[in-house]
Amino acid sequence: MVGFDAKNKTNLDSKYKCSECSLILRDPVQLTACGHRLCQSCFLNQNQTLMPCSECHMQTPKAQILIDRAFKSEMQALPIICSYYDWTDTLQNYEEHLQQLHQHLIANESQQTKLSIEEKTVFGVVEGVNENLDILIQNLASSEENINDIPCISYDGTLTWKITGFTGKMLDAQSERQTSIYSPPFYSSPTGYKMRARLYLHGDGNARKTHMSLFFVLMLGPYDAILKFPFNYKVIFCLYDQTPQQRHIIDSFRPDIKSNSFQRPRSEMNIASGIPKFVSLGMIQQEGNPYVKEDTMFIKIMVDFGDMPKTLLPYALSLNPGLPMHVQQSMVKEEHNKRLLNKRKTS
């Protein structure tokens, strides 16, 4: 993965740009012979024992090229304007922003790179085509590796969100370095609502420092013009107990149709709305709790389009998540009918 692109990269001091890819430095390393810096990935793509600097052409032995953590730390406060949309923040938050909101554009860039490779292969337009192809293939491999890390997108109104590195994320939330994290987007159907969850690990508002807050977010979707708004379907949250006891924490809410949160989105995301006091911090921070195992937590978000009775939620969420959704729905329906039959027999 090469450096970061941004609308304001030309306005930044040249010391913050990679001497190899000319983008904003990503994980900078320093050439000790001349002091210039480049991205760690740009450095790793080089096979020479002596690394020539693209700016001054001085050569540095590979063994003397240093990872510059102090400089990376200095860069975190750089102002950044997103290269895709009108988003302004610091470099510290930019990579997460790109991953959360522009995954499809990253995928598109990968495809464009691939097409560029094919054109150069067929027509031999560029001089020194073999050397250029090597560079393009390396860039394509980096982009495809990034795409492969993107979780599979759900189109059935449910998302099982795997949150890794829980301890580090909780520390970030406690110190207010990053108070909230977003889930990957998911959809109600291939032509349906686009949604995601927002999690405040150390709580939000009145719930800060006492509870984990979990919210639902409507996003700007490609089919909003033909969908019905306000969005008024029940939203269910489940924090998985990762032991055989399956004492999942389940809560749900029905949208307030007067709230702007559930109207048709006019910007990238509506204001998040949900359950501020989803689960107490004491419960998930105690040692040996069943909800965080191997520094990982699983949360399920489910939009209920069929108005499932609340008494059925524990059963529905105890089903094997590995089963196809239509199989789970069939089992829930069967269980519902069974309970109705038993109720009639006893009445």
Image (tube, rainbow, N blue to C red):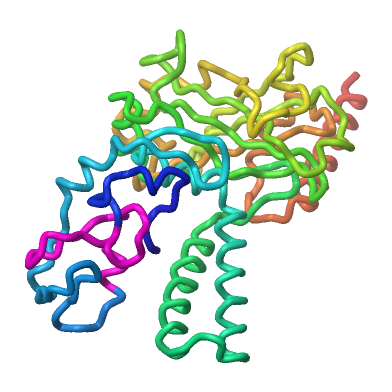
Kindly identify the residue that appears in the image at 67 percent across and 37 percent down.
195
Residue at the limit of the structure toward the top, as seen here: 206
Q: Is residue 60 left or right of residue 346?
A: left
- Give residue 216's quadrant in the image: top right
Q: Is residue 278 above or below residue 37?
A: above
Residue 332, given in percent of the width and then of the height, sits at 78, 41
Q: What segment is highlighted magenta in the picture? A: 18-44
Residue 224, given in percent of the width and then of the height, sits at 81, 36
Q: Is residue 36 left or right of residue 280?
A: left
Q: Is residue 118 left or right of residue 324?
A: left
Residue 155, given in percent of the width and then of the height, sits at 74, 49
Q: Closest to the observer: 161 or 291?
A: 161
Q: Is residue 262 visible?
A: yes
Kindly identify the residue that appears in the image at 66 percent across and 23 percent down.
252
* Quadrant in the picture for the N terminus: bottom left
Check if residue 40 falls in the magenta segment.
yes
- Give residue 342's quadrant in the image: top right
* Quadrant in the picture for the C terminus: top right
Residue 38, given in percent of the width and then of the height, sits at 25, 62
Kindly identify the residue that appears in the image at 65 percent across and 52 percent down.
153
Check if residue 317 falls in the magenta segment.
no
Q: Is residue 308 above or below residue 299?
A: above
